[in-house]
Image (cartoon, rainbow, N blue to C red):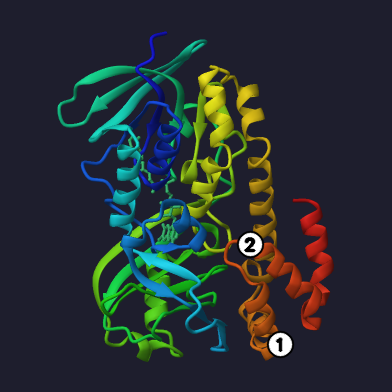
Amino acid sequence: MDYDYDVVIVGAGPVGGYASRLLCERGLSVLMIEEHTEIGRPFQCAGLVTPSAMHAVEAYGTVVQDVDGALIHGPSGTLVPVGKDGELRTYVVCRKRFDQEVVQQGLKAGADIVLESQPTDAVIHPDGVLVTIKNQRTKLEREVSCKLFIGCDGAHSWVRRKFKMGHPKEMMVGFQAEVVGYEGKNRWLEMYSGSEIAPGFFAWVIPSGNDTHRIGLWSKADMLDGKTILDCYNDLLTHPLWKERFENIRETARYCGPVPSGMIRRPFKERVMVLGDAAGMAKPTTGGGLGPGFKQISSIVDNLVIAINNDKLTEKDLKSVTKASWPKMKKEQDRARALRDLLVSTRTDEELDKHFANFAKPEVIQLINSVGDIEKPVPLGMALLRKVPAFRKLAFQAGVKLLFT
Ligand SMILES: Cc1cc2nc3c(=O)[nH]c(=O)nc-3n(C[C@H](O)[C@H](O)[C@H](O)COP(=O)(O)OP(=O)(O)OC[C@H]3O[C@@H](n4cnc5c(N)ncnc54)[C@H](O)[C@@H]3O)c2cc1C
């Protein structure tokens, strides 16, 4: 086959843009296919980017707010502050500018892009992949050949469905409004919990610069008990404990979107691979998908480039390329989910209140602040179970769960 490109990537979101850059910087030719006319729109994101994810793309110019900590509210109002003034925990970005910056880095490294276009077919041949691309405006189709076809096409990935690569373990639903008029603590975000507000999960209020905030929540359809995610949002705004805080807000925008979490069973097949949301990489504890998506490609890129250059891209070859990091990432994700379920998602409000009463003890807050790392929730969960007497009776259940994940 005469290859037009070494790699064709569907989706010019942050993970597609980052993957393009890493592959081009290593001498490969890459084409990105993006269905929208503009990069970064529409977006569904709270815009939290952890320091390590930011370090990968250095998109510091897109930061709208630094965040030092979280004020976490229990269902009955117990407040647990986690973090320390002046010690940055995470960034808040303008997601549109962030995506544009990351995709531009891919273009600067040499990638090509076609906008307003989608793949309509992709056929795997022994020596390459033939991708049919259709421009949605002109309706014109063309065929492009490549060695490797990558899906970075988000939660409802066409590539994942086309090649029957499985489903993310969980598909949460997130809702968010952009508001003015909320008065929060400078450089701190807030989290609210309780079965009325965000069953099994939490709601958030995130400062996003210039006196604006992002108010959102996420949950799972099977936990909503007939309610919509919008009902939960309204319940947060009118909750007896907190309604005064939301009295003066004015919405400027609303978004809703899926959060796929649980790496799919087969993220690769012969000459095909999926990355980021397409592979179900979002964290089960926070819903953050940017960091895991970046890590998924950066952890394999050097071996992947060797495999592409040697045209060793069978399913077995790709398994060998990914084996040092992806199974470990999947296991960490499974363990984090098991601990999240045990400590939060399967608990009643009464049980959660008891947990919050324990979290709020000074020695426990100190432990959370010293071990707590948004990137690594499992060590924190384990430390809580081991060191906080009130949680010890859960330790056995946790041990059993972790043994089988
Ligand atoms: C409400 C909400 C809040 C969130 N908050 C955070 C947060 O604070 N921090 C965080 O890290 N994560 C957050 N996430 C998750 C985060 O948005 C995703 O994990 C992240 O966007 C994944 O990046 P991606 O590049 O894999 O996919 P996407 O960002 O979905 O990009 C996919 C790209 O592919 C394109 N595409 C899709 N299908 C096709 C097709 N057939 N043909 C051509 N192009 C196609 C899309 O247009 C898009 O440009 C949140 C999600 C939601 C819903």
Q: Nearer the viewer, residue 60 or 80?
A: 60
Q: Which residue is mark 1?
A: 363
Q: Nearer the viewer, residue 276 or 237?
A: 276
Q: In terms of image quadrants, where is residue 206?
A: bottom left
| Residue 152 in sight here | no
Does 102 sit left or right of 70 as displayed? left
Mark 2 residue element: loop
Q: Earlier in the sequence, mark 2 or mark 1?
A: 1
* Rendered location of residue 387, percent (x, y): 79, 78
| Residue 127 in sight here | yes
Residue shown at the point (54%, 58%) measured from the top left: 222
- Mark 2, residues whose alpha carbon is within 10 Å: few (<14), some, or many (≥20)? some
Extreme residue in the left direction:
138
Quadrant into which the N terminus falls: top left
Give the Cα distance between marks 2 and 1.
Answer: 20 Å
Q: Is residue 62 above or below residue 233?
A: above
Residue shown at the point (41%, 78%) measured from the top left: 235
Mark 1 residue element: helix
Residue shown at the point (65%, 23%) measured from the top left: 316
Q: Amino acid at mark 2?
A: Lys
* Rendered location of residue 49, percent (x, y): 44, 61
Residue 376 badge = 2
- Mark 1, residues whose alpha carbon is within 10 Å: few (<14), some, or many (≥20)? few
Q: In terms of image quadrants, where is residue 179?
A: bottom left
